[in-house]
Image (spheres, rainbow, N blue to C red):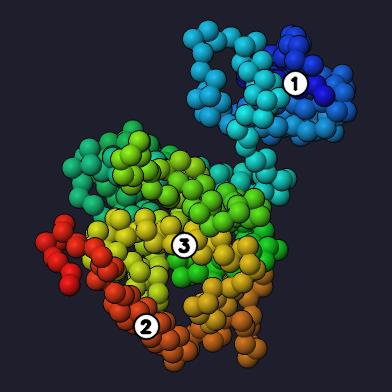
Amino acid sequence: MRVIGLDVHRSFAVVAILEDSVLSSGGRVELARDAVVAFGRKLRPKDEVVIEATGNTAMIVRLLRPFVQRVVIANPLQVRAIAHAKIKTDKIDAAVLAKLHASGFLPEVWMPDEATETLRRLVAQRSQIVQQMTRIKNRVHGVLHTNLIPPYDGELFSASGRLWLGSLPLEKDEMLAVRRYLADLDQRMADLAVLDRVLAEHALRDERVRRLMTLSGVHVTVAMGLLVAMGLLAAIGDIKRFASSEKLVSYFGLNPSVRQSGNGSAHHGRITKQGRSHARGMLVEAAWAAARVPGPLRAFFLRIQSRRGKSVAAVATARKLAVLVWHLLSKGEDYAWARPALLEAKLRKVELAAGHPAVKGRRQGRAHAYNSQEVRERERAWLAQAEHAYTRFVASWQTRPPEGRTDAANRKRTN
């Protein structure tokens, strides 16, 4: 078996070939589609190609995979930590990849399937559009601040807010800039509506989205609900690649850092924040939402908040949500404390976002039950009862130390 190491750059890749413990140079490969396919045809069916994770890795893997036995993607951060060297060239980097893979020490990265990769691109595009909209709005607010104009009492970018903007005593060039900003904002909003419709269509075809929407933190609003559910699925991909919920928590960077050496005790610090930062942020947002509605998650949030504060409670609840997500997806079950009427309302909003026709006439739609105040109050009372039961359960925990311990740190002595 040969191992082919590729040190990838923007326009070319340097090749190193390791065969029978003998290392040789394979020259350069231009990173154009035809050139990569031509390089793949020169490889053997039993070859294994090693490449670091970069921006163009996915396309290179897709082009080379039909010609070789396996294409392995290496984690660049861990490779640098393992194979740090003072002398660094492209040939050395390619050779290091080949040697690490041949010796079994290469830290690999999971390559998402085509559907997950498409979903990741859609979620990333939506996030970019939202960031662009935020920047445009900040520019408009900056113009008002520069001219000492008090903030508008209402939604500035609504129809009434735009009329107010048009009546301001601004200089001609500044007014032209505001109009240009508003035109850019309208274009971004149109792009966002198209992406939300595509994401809603994807959501209706994926049973996992409905399962995640049973969680309390996945909002009833279409934008936030789809953003949380689809963003988590895009980051996770195949849930089977996580052997336990702790693995998924670590993947999101929500596990505490640990420092321990020699005979000293282990010190647990802040969360590592090593992993999918976008998904971690969405879990924290979902935790804040779960803290505002009755249920066991709110009781958990309040219990941590009473001891550590709101910020720590939000992160702890986000970790709890990650554990719940692993159990829901790996076991194929819905959340035990889901609100049926609220879930149907969420799904109906997703259908409308996907372009499904509205129900007219006397025929009742799937969200009809949620329109009843009696139904909503009954579901909230049921969750409030579950929250109270959780609080009583936690309060009944034994706080006394085990027998044989003096608990000297608290200046107590057991009999």
| Residue 313 falls left or right of residue 81 | left
Q: Quick one: label 3, few (<14), some, or many (20+) residues within 10 Å? A: many
Q: Taking 103 as reference, is 407 above or below it?
A: below
Image quadrant in which the C terminus is located: bottom left
User: In the visual, does 252 lie left or right of 235?
Assistant: left
Label number found at residue 321? 3
Q: CA distance from mark 3 to mark 2?
A: 19 Å
Q: Residues within 10 Å of mark 2 (few under 14, many from 20)?
A: some
Tell me which corner region of the image, top left, top right, bottom left or bottom right, holds residue 54: top right
Position of residue 381 measured from the top left corner of the image (x, y, whole percent): 39, 87
In primary-sequence order, the first of circles 3 and 2 is 3
Disc number placed over residue 68 in the picture, else none: none
- At 55% from the left and 68% from the top, the residue drawn is 213
Direction from residue 102 to residue 300 in the image, left or right: left
User: In the image, is residue 393 above or below residue 263?
Assistant: below
Q: Position of residue 358 (x, y in %)?
A: 63, 76
What residue sits right under mark 1 in the picture?
Answer: 4
Q: Residue at x 56, y 26 (%)?
A: 79
Q: Secondary structure at mark 3?
A: helix
Task: Looking at the picture, tell me which residue is in the foreground, 385 or 290.
Answer: 385
Q: Reading the chain from its start, which is encountered first: label 1 or label 3?
A: 1
Q: Is residue 170 above or below residue 190?
A: above
Residue 71, percent across and down?
74, 32
- Location of mark 2 (residue): 389
SS label for mark 1: strand
